Image: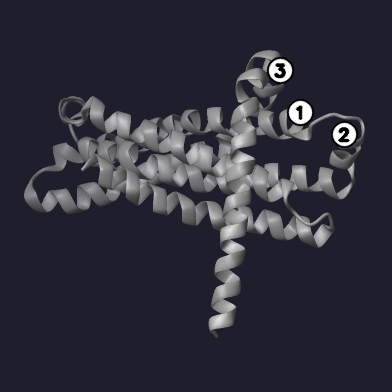
């Protein structure tokens, strides 16, 4: 048993250290790639962000609608139905918007990044680049990493905005809450600090989700089975990391 624990800890430490070195290599090339291959970065923002808008919009709307239903049902006990908008805004902007967006991003864009890079490795495209003296990190990995990092805060903002629309339709349209009170309570009580917390979370989650996706793809075993495992690990590891980081960032803001 102790031998298995030792082997697991050793493997975790080795993998964690290798990923940190990989992250440093990415950061070193980010400024150059951002300015010299801007079009490539924009294309990756489109792939990671624009192509995820449908699932983000649908999930954001129904999450906001559920918050509107739950908020009205519970706040009505205290005759505080007018605060449904404030309740929904706090939940979406500070917590559910960044977290759920990160999980959806990992399931849609993260798996696409991991499988794309993994297939390039399995078909020896990355090895061919290295044989031609072309570093695959700035050519392949960094644009996809930057695309995910840039797209993630935009997707989180879109999720929260559509969620507020869903809560508005439920609260105002279904339960007849005064529209002025719905938005006035939100504008009065939601401060910039709350918005900054959501922005910081979405940026940190974007870095984590993009890093895990490109790392799993780049370090995957160059077989069909290896690419499949890397794709699965991307979702699992990203979900765990997002929840841990969410707890840590929330504790810092309290």
As drawn, the residue found furthest toward the left would be 78
Q: How far apart in space, not on screen, are marks 2 and 3 (Cα)?
A: 17 Å
Helix, strand or loop at mark 2: helix
Which type of secondary structure does the marked residue at label 3 adopt?
loop
Q: Is residue 240 left or right of residue 93?
A: right
Q: Which mark is residue 129?
A: 2
Instruction: Using a 10 Å C-alpha cutoff, classify the residue at mark 1 as few (fewer than 14 neighbours), some (14 to 19) or many (20 or more).
Output: some
In three-dimensional space, the C-alpha distance between marks 3 and 1, rounded to whole angstroms, equals: 9 Å
**Vertical comparison of 160 with 251: above or below:** above
Quarter of the picture containing the N terminus is bottom right
Please state the horizontal and vertical placement of residue 84, each as a whole percent of the image: 21, 40
Work out whether mark 2 precedes mark 3 in sequence or the reverse, and give the earlier one: 3
Q: Position of residue 236 (x, y in %)?
A: 56, 58
Mark 1 touches mark 2? (CB < 8 Å): yes
Residue lying at the far top of the rendered structure = 35
**Few, some or many residues within 10 Å of mark 3 (<14, 14–19, 20+):** some
Residue for point 86% across, 36% down: 130
Q: Which residue is mark 3?
A: 37
| Pointer 1 or 2: first along the chain | 2
Residue 87 visible in the picture: yes
Rendered image: mark on residue 101: none
Along the line of sight, the residue nearer the viewer: 203 or 14: 14
Is residue 118 rendered to the left or right of residue 189?
right
- Where residue 180 sits, quadrant-wise, is top left
């Amino acid at each position: 048993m102790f031998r298995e624990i030792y082997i697991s800890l050793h493997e975790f430490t080795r993998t964690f250290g290798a990923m940190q070195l990989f992250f440093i290599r990415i950061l070193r090339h980010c400024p150059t790639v951002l300015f010299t291959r801007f079009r490539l970065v924009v294309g990756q923002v489109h792939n990671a962000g624009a192509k995820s808008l449908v699932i983000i919009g649908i999930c954001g709307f129904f999450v906001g609608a559920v918050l509107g239903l739950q908020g009205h049902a519970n706040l009505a006990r205290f005759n505080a139905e007018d605060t449904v908008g404030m309740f929904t805004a706090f939940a979406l902007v500070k917590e559910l918007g960044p977290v759920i967006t990160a999980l959806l991003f990992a399931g849609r864009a993260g798996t696409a990044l991991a499988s794309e890079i993994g297939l390039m490795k399995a078909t020896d495209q990355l090895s061919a680049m290295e044989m031609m003296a072309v570093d695959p990190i700035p050519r392949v990995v960094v644009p996809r990493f930057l695309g995910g990092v840039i797209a993630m805060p935009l997707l989180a903002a879109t999720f929260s905005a559509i969620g507020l629309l869903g809560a508005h339709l439920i609260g105002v349209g279904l339960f007849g809450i005064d529209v002025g009170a719905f938005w006035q309570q939100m504008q009065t009580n939601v401060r910039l600090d709350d918005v900054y917390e959501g922005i910081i979370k979405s940026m940190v989650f974007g870095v984590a989700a993009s890093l895990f996706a490109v790392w799993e793809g780049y370090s995957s075993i160059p077989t069909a089975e290896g690419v499949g495992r890397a794709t699965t690990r991307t979702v699992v590891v990203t979900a765990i990391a997002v929840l841990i980081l969410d707890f840590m960032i929330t504790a810092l803001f309290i």
